[in-house]
Amino acid sequence: LTYRYYGHHQTDDTRRYRLPGEEEAARARDCVALLRARLESLGVAQADELEAIEAENKALLEQAVVFARSSDLPPASELTTDVYVPAPGER
Amino acid sequence: MTAVPATRELSFGQAINEALRQAMRADPTVIVLGEDIAGGAGRAHLGFVDAWGGAMRATRGLIQEFGPERVIDTPISEMGFVGAAVGAAMTGLRPVVEVMFVDLIGMCLDQIVNQAAKMHYMMGGAVRVPLVIRTAYGTRGDKRTYGGGAAAQHSQTLYSVLAHFPGLKVVVPSTAFNAKGLTTSAIRDDGPVVVMEHKFLGLHARSHVPTEPYTVPIGKAEIARRGKDVTLVGMGRTTHLCLEAAALLEKDGISAEVVDLLTLNPLDEESVFESVSRTHRLVVVDEDTPVCSIARDVAARVAEKAFDFLDAPIRTVTAADAPVPFAAVLEALYSPRVEQIVAAVREQLG
């Protein structure tokens, strides 16, 4: 079962339609947290390895945001770019 | 002395809400269902209060009046709840099902195309499917210009896809007035009708709407503005673009007529031919992508059946032949623009 912690969009206040305690219950069975605990208990990965992976990905996402914010707006030609995959031999 | 019917200004969404409410009061077999049409209603701690009322707020307040047996907040499963609506329609109810955005129609296309649209035909007329599918379309366009940024999976138009299927009627209101009238007609129709509601109009269009129930006929176009030099054919949002273009052209002494299709299937081609017989020029403005579009369908009908009226090649103004881009600067280029309509007319008049 997938549970969405945040609103469906920025202005969606989940308190308007959720039961009290619902989100806490979902967080208690968060599959990402459970997998992490299981990986550690099975000895597949150590806590510091998992933390390093997490830090690496967080840094990548932060870089992506910086890149997006500092990039030029796309030119008009982008409107019809990448609609179709190039035919074999093209590009 | 004839009494003047009472009217007041309503938004497009409020007009649809009133059509639903009045139909539900008049006929206990009318039910509404869909995702978040009430939004959390019926939760024990909240009571029957709607948190949302749908993307257009068109179903707001219905659950308070009609209760959860007739106002059904469904799980996120278009195949399930549209299928349920088709079955309910075949067995005595008149369901109005909301598919929040037309982009989601692929999830339930089999229920619509292979069940609802052709059941009457396949059963030799013995079965009727009095189903209404309400769905929002178009780029979001928060302001007067486009640029809603709802991206490729929440901004499509797709009415030409739905108009393609025999047996399925498709209406596209352009004002709060005809939104109420067409929705009422759709509910009273004994076959399946899709009501396409433009997101921009849903939140921004306002007009005077009679308080009493009334219908706007399905299958009938309207002349939204009289003119003599060129016919601009619009539908939904593009009718307003045509009217803006006509106002600009008037400053140059060009008199443009605007035909608002209102129904895409069955299409009122006679009204288009009649207009073109007087203006001798045709520009069709369609927010959908160009291949197999309503724009090209109208153009083909005129070319086949009314060619002799024409003094200039038919022109179409459509969305780009691409998915809807996310970037606001590209979305602004994607959909038909008033200046493209004006340029097409100027070319025709040489």
Image (tube, helix red, strand yellow):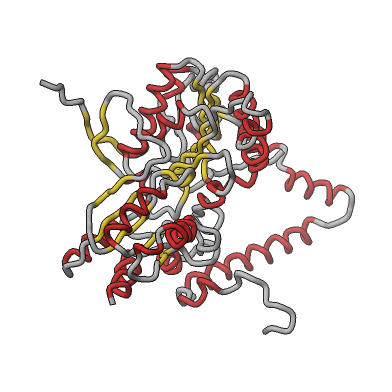
Q: Is residue B140 above or below residue B205?
A: below
Q: Position of residue B290 (x, y in %)?
A: 50, 63
Quadrant containing the C terminus of chain B is bottom left
Question: Which quarter of the figure has residue B55?
Answer: top left
Please state which of residues B27 and B168 is positioned toward the viewer in this rendering.
B168
Q: Is residue A49 above or below residue B129?
A: below
> Which residue: 86% across, 47% down?
A41
Q: Is residue A56 visible?
A: yes
**In the drawing, does residue B267 fall left or right of residue A40?**
left
Q: Is residue B27 above or below residue B41?
A: above
Q: Is residue B287 visible?
A: no
> Which residue: 55% across, 46% down?
B162
Q: Position of residue B292 (x, y in %)?
A: 55, 59
> Which residue: 50% across, 47% down?
A9
Q: Position of residue B311 (x, y in %)?
A: 33, 69
**In the drawing, does residue B314 fall left or right of residue B117?**
left
Question: Which quarter of the figure has residue B173?
Answer: top left
Q: Position of residue B51 (x, y in %)?
A: 46, 31
